[in-house]
Image (cartoon, coloured by chain):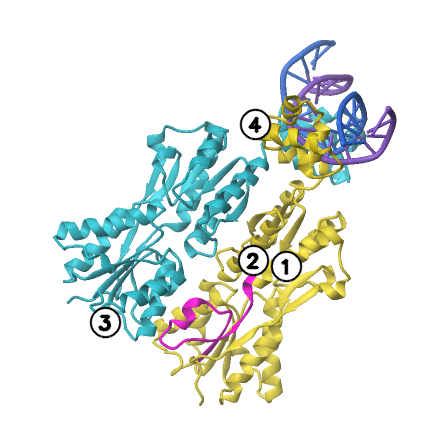
Chain colours: A cyan, B yellow, C blue, D purple
DNA sequence: CTGAAAGCGCTTACAG
DNA sequence: CTGAAAGCGCTTACAG
């Protein structure tokens, strides 16, 4: 393996000079620059990034910590983040916490040891002491999907409450009053905000909330499946359902099929998140679509900004991206 | 920030001793060990992984290079790989090449600079000189999804040809002879192998191959959509179609909907890859399911094995995982 | 069992 | 504009 020193010898200059032309830092005469470049070429030299990171104390590496990358929402977020990272010369490590605070803590510790320059984090619980400590220790973090106000960190989320309020009102406007709601893990802010949107819409319409109609699918397909089934063990199932994310919607659709209930005849349905296949169903789903890719991209850009320009005023850095309500054919008036 | 030296001072021992107890290497008396551990605790010391990597010349970091992580196949592969990596204390960087050889080359160069310990690679083209050079330079690589025999690298793929042959024969057995085939990018081995399976089945049944029925969807949803439409501009469209991957199947389903053709009445359909939603369609799709998660997991384990035990005999390391044919309701006899 | 010291391969003040 | 040298924070022969 050829080292900086080898190139220096080959070109008859000091390692400092090589370093300067390779990094475009400091002044180097054209004559030397040419000789250096030629030597680098001749020896097919590849700098050792670890040594460079050591000397510069930066790794050009970021991390993305999410519950599960196979959740299509986080997959798209990951792609957006990686694109932004790559454009700026950064690499991205990804970590799956499975919504386990312990796993999150473990990953964060490793990432700190690795001295990643920053991390994009979708927190997995309410307990955020360990995060606070890391931030105090200088770790740069941008929150995604779930804000945690007390952390006062930059974040990129969407208008969860407004979105679900719109969706719920849409159903109310079509005569529904027994509207089921499938929540995610209420430990995370986005789940709570979506529930709040549902409750706000009911309150606004003067509809009494029925606890039996609010079920938790834990943001997973399996959970959505189970919660969906439980809704149909009710003496009086809902005439419409709002699901808090794509995974639960898939699970719910499986449950509906098993119960022999069809959308929209037996039940109207609106999903948070849009997926390609939602349009392929016999009756395409009405959804609230998040800009998934953009969430990842913006969050990564924000993190990069924090790294180069320092943390922005907190007011300016709590980004809320807009969602889009897309009416298709899964709701009917009653 | 506290350094090894600080801990050493605090405990009144040398840095060497701290290093030894932290790494569990070398012998250290219980007395000292205790003092060291206490000091580490007191100072809340986190070792600097970059310095450690420098000294040990290993980064405990791997990379996963795929065309696009949002392709559900690669998403699952990524999850499998990350799980395996995490279990062994490794981190995983992910890279999206968009099937561009240039991007692949760029990523590989960066990964080499970063001194990742190994990479899981789904090659994006036929040109593999740059890969050969990296291997010669000592880079540890395990191929996934697409083997490249001339590279003679360990690999984890599936039995593409056999799987498609089975699927095609299934249609032939049901009386189909005008069977359309949607291929992926034929630059990659898996696409070619799947096409070979289709051709073998036709040949075996004595059915003449009709070039017009073989269209390319480039492994993408958009490509599948376009290719699907083109099939219905034919004077005599096929009575059945085999699609080479999940993305193209989604695109094809969109095309069929646009053309007003329904599965299985107007056309029988078999997809390579299974997705949760395939079972939710009005007529659940018959598929050839790959063990996606397992491909990633096994590949990563194989890579880890290469790192610790050295490269195994090539014969043993060209893994071909079995696929599963799942008959559902998207094919009818004619 | 323990420590002093060299070494990992770069970058960057500091001189000149 | 260029180089000698210190420094980044660990690990690991080498002595003892």
Residue B42's disc is: 4
Secondary element at image label 2: helix
| Cβ atoms under marks 4 and 1 closer than 8 Å | no
Q: Which quarter of the rendered picture does the N terminus of chain A lie within?
A: top right
| Cβ atoms under marks 3 and 4 closer than 8 Å | no
Secondary element at image label 4: helix
Residue at left offset 35%, top offset 64%: A226
Given this view, does label 2 or label 4 mark the residue nearer the observer? Answer: 4
Left or right position of B110 against A309: right
Q: Are marks 4 and 1 on the same chain?
A: yes
Q: What is the span of residues highlighted in magenta in the rendered image?
A: B268-293
Q: Residues within 10 Å of mark 3 (few under 14, many from 20)?
A: some
Q: Which residue is mark 3?
A: A266
In percent of width and height, residue A237 lies at 22, 67
Whole-angstrom CA distance, mark 2 to mark 4, is: 37 Å
Whole-angstrom CA distance, mark 3 to mark 2, is: 38 Å
Residue at left offset 16%, top offset 66%: A333
Given this view, does label 4 or label 1 mark the residue nearer the observer? Answer: 4
Q: Which residue is mark 1?
A: B299
Secondary element at image label 3: loop
Q: Is A23 placed above or below B102 here?
A: above
How many marks can you see?
Answer: 4
Residue B80's disc is: 2
């Amino acid at each position: 393996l050829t080292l900086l020193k080898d190139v220096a010898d080959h070109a008859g200059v000091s390692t400092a000079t090589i370093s300067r032309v390779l990094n475009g830092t400091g002044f180097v005469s054209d004559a030397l620059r040419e000789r250096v470049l030629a030597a680098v070429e001749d020896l097919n030299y590849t700098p050792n990034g670890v040594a460079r990171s050591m000397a510069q104390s930066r790794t050009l590496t970021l991390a993305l910590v999410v519950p599960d990358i196979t959740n299509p929402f986080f997959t798209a977020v990951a792609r957006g983040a990686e694109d932004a990272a790559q454009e700026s010369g950064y690499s991205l490590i990804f970590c799956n916490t499975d919504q386990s605070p312990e796993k999150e803590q473990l990953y964060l510790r490793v990432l700190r040891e690795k001295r990643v320059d920053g991390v994009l984090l979708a927190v997995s619980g309410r307990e955020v002491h360990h995060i606070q400590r890391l931030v105090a220790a200088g770790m740069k973090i941008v929150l995604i999907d779930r804000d945690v106000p007390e952390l006062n960190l930059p974040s990129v989320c969407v208008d969860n409450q407004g979105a679900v309020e719109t969706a719920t009102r849409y159903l109310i406007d079509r005569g529904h009053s027994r509207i089921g709601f499938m929540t995610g893990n209420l430990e995370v802010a986005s789940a709570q905000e979506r529930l709040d949107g549902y409750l706000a819409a009911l309150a606004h319409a003067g509809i009494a909330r029925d606890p039996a109609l609010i079920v938790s699918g834990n943001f997973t397909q399996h959970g959505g499946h189970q919660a969906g089934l439980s809704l149909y063990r009710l003496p009086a199932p809902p005439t419409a359902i709002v699901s808090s994310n794509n995974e639960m919607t898939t699970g719910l659709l499986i449950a509906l099929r098993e119960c022999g209930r069809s959308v929209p005849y037996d039940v109207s349905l609106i999903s948070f998140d849009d997926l390609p296949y939602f349009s392929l169903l016999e009756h395409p789903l009405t959804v609230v679509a998040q800009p998934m890719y953009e969430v990842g991209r913006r969050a990564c850009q924000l993190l990069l900004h924090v790294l180069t320009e320092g943390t922005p005023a907190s007011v300016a850095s709590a980004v809320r991206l807009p969602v889009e309500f897309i009416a298709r054919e899964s709701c009917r008036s009653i």
